């Protein structure tokens, strides 16, 4: 659920980065560029952590069986 809701922040971050490439004033962006990059990096970290947690849970389930 967290990853689905976080996708909205990632969409805003991507839009800000794309607009910045078009030389739009930073005042007009929905997100500061440093924040946008941090949001995207956190999204990647969140997906990796979720995958690792699922793999761990599967290993625990297999060990208990």
Image (cartoon, rainbow, N blue to C red):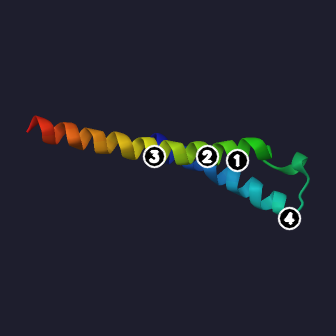
- Which one is closest to the eye, mark 2 or mark 4? 2
- The reply to whether dot 2 and dot 1 touch (C-beta < 8 Å) is yes
Sequence-wise, the earlier of marks 1 and 3 is: 1
Which mark is on residue 15? none
* Residue at the spot of label 2: 41
Q: Is residue 54 left or right of residue 64?
A: right
Q: Secondary structure at mark 2?
A: helix
- Which one is closest to the eye, mark 1 or mark 4? 1
Q: Alpha-carbon neighbours of circle 3 within 10 Å: few (<14), some, or many (≥20)?
A: few
Sequence-wise, the earlier of marks 2 and 3 is: 2
Spatial CA span between label 2 and label 3: 11 Å
Q: Is residue 16 left or right of residue 53?
A: right
- The residue drawn where x is 8% and y is 39% is 65
Rendering quarter of residue 21: bottom right
* Residue at the spot of label 4: 22
* Residue at the spot of label 1: 37
Quarter of the figure that contains the N terminus: top left
- The residue drawn where x is 67% and y is 42% is 38
């Amino acid at each position: 659920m967290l990853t689905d809701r976080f996708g909205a922040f990632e969409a805003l971050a991507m839009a800000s980065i794309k607009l910045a490439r078009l030389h739009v004033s930073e005042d007009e962006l929905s997100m500061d560029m440093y924040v946008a990059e941090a949001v995207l990096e956190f999204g990647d970290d969140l997906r990796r952590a979720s995958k690792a947690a699922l793999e761990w849970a599967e290993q625990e389930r297999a060990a208990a069986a």
